[in-house]
């Protein structure tokens, strides 16, 4: 999270000569800005093998998956790989452009150190969103036909994601109030809600069937309301679980990895073609999300060279909400979001106005030691610092991401334990 500094506009009337002089000074100042630090792509790719090796083993060896489905997943993976390198190339270029428009911030968690005075480009999530959309659109050529049943919902999903990217960038530029931020995902989810033609039923848990008297319950419009609320939660929960280098992108990478593993396991264990296609649909959107996010993480990892902005957090949250809805695993998705749920519950008193809420609910940074100290603000970041003591920003981010991974593993263990008994 950054304290954003923007160019102030002079409301008074200026002569053309004065305006020309001001533009010249701005151009000169921007031309002297140093380039951003190199990416940490090698380090990120090395650690990514921990996920990719077992992931592709499950697809191509462990489970008996149809050849056509394997082919589609592989083509999508190759496109995602190309998107990774395209994103790595585009981020430094986009950084220069946003710096020219004074879209930069200073890292508050490094205030009082030389790194705290460096201009960090903001809103680089717009690059990730653009690359993701290009990949998702190109993939239609290889997988969907004009009479495909999934094509309408696939394009509706892309429309919602595109809408969220636009609104997120508007938020970055205009810095809209929190109450308005709650409405933005609702607006962006409209294309998906209007085009959704799937079922609106839920399966009653087996222990509750004697009391309800039904095995399947049709919720009708209430189900679509739930879909809209899920989109609002996913986008805003990632947006408020932030504040340290790498956390926003890191949590997305962990959750996206868990979603991919879950989808492959469900495809391998099912014999229902429609059920398999629903989870394959999820894979087709999450693989590009993971690849582009890894590229962004290579610049956003501590010490961060770029800030992702609300553009990225809204985009990532909406994408995962879309795949959870259309893949029909929204319950599992919410369990993957356990740290975000806890952070939201901790934040609720301040977000509701019951307790005063500062602009930046960040820990205190000690420039002498380089350590962070937790405050009384209701965030998971501050709670971890209060419970585990002072630590560096990098160590805190790693600890939070490990907690995110533990939450995802808990979800898999819970599904295994309840299988056959709960549903």
Image (cartoon, rainbow, N blue to C red):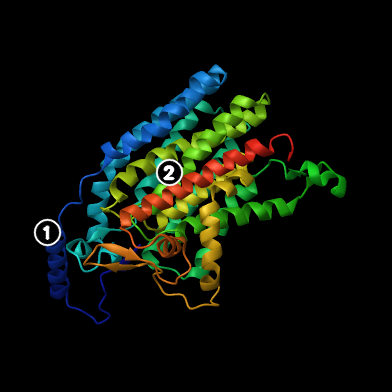
Quadrant of residue 4 in the image? bottom left
Q: Quadrant of residue 31?
A: bottom left
Q: Earlier in the sequence, mark 1 or mark 2?
A: 1
**Residue, far bottom:** 12
- Dot 2: few (<14), some (14–19), or many (≥20) neighbours within 10 Å? many
* Residue found 64% across the figure and 51% down from its top: 227
How far across and how far down the image is residue 122, in percent? 31, 58
Q: Residue at x 44, y 68 (%)?
A: 176
x then y, percent, for residue 73: 49, 27
Q: Which is more toward the observer, 153 or 311?
A: 311
Placement of the N terminus among the 4 image quadrants:
bottom left
Residue ID for mark 1: 32
Q: Residue at x 45, y 58 (%)?
A: 241
| Residue 184 seen from this side | no
Question: Would residue 314 appear left or right of 101 to someone viewing this image?
Answer: right
Front position among marks 1 and 2 = 2
Disc 1 is placed on an element classified as loop
User: How far is mark 1 from mark 2, CA to CA?
Assistant: 34 Å
50 or 88: nearer the viewer: 50
Task: Tell me: 244 left or right of 116.
Answer: right
Numbered label tally: 2
The residue lying furthest to the front in this view is 388
Q: Residue 109, position in %: x, y? A: 30, 64
| Vertical relation: 412 (above or below) 165 | above
Q: Is the C terminus in the top left, top right, bottom left or bottom right quadrant?
A: top right
Q: Is residue 293 visible?
A: yes
Corner quadrant of residue 308: bottom left
Nearer-the-camera pick, 192 or 339: 339
Any mark on residue 253, and which? 2
For disc 1, the neighbor class at 10 Å (few under 14, some 14 to 19, many from 20) is few
Q: Is residue 369 left or right of residue 171?
A: left
Q: Are marks 1 and 2 in contact (CB under 8 Å)?
A: no
């Amino acid at each position: 999270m950054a304290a954003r500094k923007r160019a102030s506009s002079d409301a008074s009337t200026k002569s053309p000569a004065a305006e020309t002089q001001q533009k010249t000074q701005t151009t000169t100042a921007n031309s002297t800005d140093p380039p951003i630090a190199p990416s940490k792509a090698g380090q990120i790719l090395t650690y990514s093998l921990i996920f990719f090796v077992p992931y592709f083993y499950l697809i191509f060896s462990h489970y008996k998956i149809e050849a056509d489905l394997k082919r589609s997943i592989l083509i999508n993976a190759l496109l995602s790989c190309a998107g990774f390198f395209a994103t790595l190339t585009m981020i430094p270029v986009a950084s220069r452009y946003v710096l020219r428009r004074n879209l930069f911030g200073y890292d508050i968690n490094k205030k009082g150190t030389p790194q705290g005075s460096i201009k960090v480009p903001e809103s680089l999530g717009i690059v990730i969103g653009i690359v993701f959309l290009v990949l998702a659109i190109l993939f239609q050529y290889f997988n969907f036909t004009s009479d495909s049943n999934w094509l309408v919902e696939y394009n509706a999903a892309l429309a919602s994601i595109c809408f969220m990217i636009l609104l997120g960038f508007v938020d970055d530029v205009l810095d809209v109030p929190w109450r308005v931020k709650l409405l933005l995902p609702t607006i962006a989810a409209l294309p998906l809600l209007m085009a959704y033609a799937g079922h609106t039923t839920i399966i009653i848990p087996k222990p509750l069937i004697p009391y309800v008297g039904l095995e399947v319950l049709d919720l009708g419009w209430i189900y679509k309301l739930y879909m809209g609320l899920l989109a609002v939660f996913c986008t805003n929960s990632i947006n408020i679980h932030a504040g340290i280098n790498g956390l926003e992108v890191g949590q997305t990478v962990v959750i996206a990895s868990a979603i991919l593993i879950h989808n492959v396991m469900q495809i391998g264990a099912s014999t229902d073609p429609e059920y398999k296609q629903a989870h394959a649909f999820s894979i087709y959107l999450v693989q590009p999300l993971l690849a582009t996010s890894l590229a962004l993480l290579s610049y956003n990892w501590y010490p961060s060279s770029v800030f992702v902005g609300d553009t990225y957090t809204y985009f990532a949250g909406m994408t995962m909400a879309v795949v959870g809805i259309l893949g029909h695993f929204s319950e599992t998705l919410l369990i993957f979001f356990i740290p975000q749920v806890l952070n939201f519950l901790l934040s609720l008193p301040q977000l509701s106005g019951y307790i005063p809420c500062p602009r930046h609910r960040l820990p205190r940074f000690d420039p002498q030691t380089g350590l962070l100290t937790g405050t009384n603000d209701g965030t998971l970041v501050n709670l971890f610092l209060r419970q585990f003591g002072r630590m560096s920003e990098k160590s805190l981010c790693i600890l939070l991401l490990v907690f995110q991974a533990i939450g995802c593993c808990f979800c898999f263990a819970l599904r295994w334990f309840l299988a056959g008994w709960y549903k």
